[in-house]
Amino acid sequence: MTDVHKIASSAVGSNGASSAPLTLDALERAVGSHDIDTVVLALVDMEGRLVGKRLTARHFLESTVSHGAESCEYLLATDVDMSPQQGYGLAGWDRGFGDFQLKADLSTLRLLPWHPGAALVLADAFKASGEPVEVSPRQILRRQLERLAARGLRAQVGTELEFMIFRSTYRDAWESGYRNLTKATPYSVDYTLLDTNNIEPLIKRIRISMEGAGLNVESSKGECNLGQHEINFRYGDALRICDDHSIYKLGSKEIAAQEGMAITFMAKFDQREGSSCHVHVSLAGADGSNVFAA
């Protein structure tokens, strides 16, 4: 298996977006000029969310790049409310909670335009022995992609995430028990242009911010439910697109919070149309052709 944690910075590329992820050299220059002061080291958890640490950029360059950063094993043994659960082989109340090492995958290093002065890099979990934690979501996906590669195939993935927008803050939603929230639009805005104009400042900021973070945005549109929208991204290699998927969910929620609003990607908020997560998968052969079309 390729050790992605030792990839030369010159090999770091983009997924086709106009603003490519950062190289390590570019990060060092930005830190030296005081343009970047924080690096978010993020792990994909069992719910597909990003968890981790915010590091000073100086510490990231001096220590984390080469040695990683410690984190608790319970991050891969919790439920959606971050409560540790029994039955996991990695960690639990019956066997204790140790640490694993988070090592940055430098091919994912990028700016966070919605957090000026910050960059983000995804990490993989490693045991003290240096072996990868096999139950981590990115590692599970890598194993399946390696099985495909052994057969001369490469997975191409595209995801579409629908979401609901509320003109309430996350704190307001929590305090109200998630009841009586004000949806961003009072009626269906599926494919409409004029009626989605009032929410366009938020949607545009998400689109532009995702481009600035190296994601390849294609379009956005209103959806059927009240306050429901969708932003679409170009397909690409499976691991990279799944990484982008998690970054997009985190970023859009953070941007909404900064605008005094809230977003949820939950599948079924009310009795009306639910928010889907469409996952489009195709397989490319050695010549790049779609083997499903053969």
Image (spheres, helix red, strand yellow):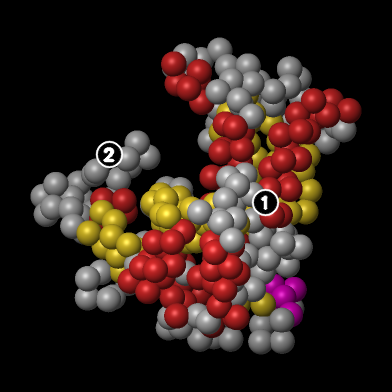
Crowding near pointer 2: few (<14 within 10 Å), some, many (20+)? few
Q: Nearer the viewer, residue 293 or 205?
A: 205
Residue 246: horizontal and vertical position, in percent? Answer: 53, 52
Q: Residue at x 73, y 17 (%)?
A: 186
Q: Label 2 belongs to which residue? A: 83
Figure quadrant of the N terminus: bottom left
Residue 83: horizontal and vertical position, in percent? Answer: 27, 39
- Assign a secondary structure to mark 1: helix
Q: Nearer the viewer, residue 127 or 193?
A: 127
Q: Label 1 belongs to which residue? A: 210
Prevalent SS, magenta region: helix
Figure quadrant of the C terminus: bottom right
The answer to whether one can see residue 150 in this image is yes
User: Does the magenta run of residues contain 54?
Assistant: no
**Residue segment shown in magenta:** 289-293
Residue 37: horizontal and vertical position, in percent? Answer: 50, 54
* Quarter-of-image position of residue 123: bottom left
Asked if residue 90 lies left or right of residue 274, the reply is left
Asked if residue 141 lies left or right of residue 276, the reply is left
Q: CA distance from mark 2 to mark 1?
A: 31 Å
Q: Residue at x 72, y 62 (%)?
A: 19
Frontmost of labels 2 and 1 is: 1
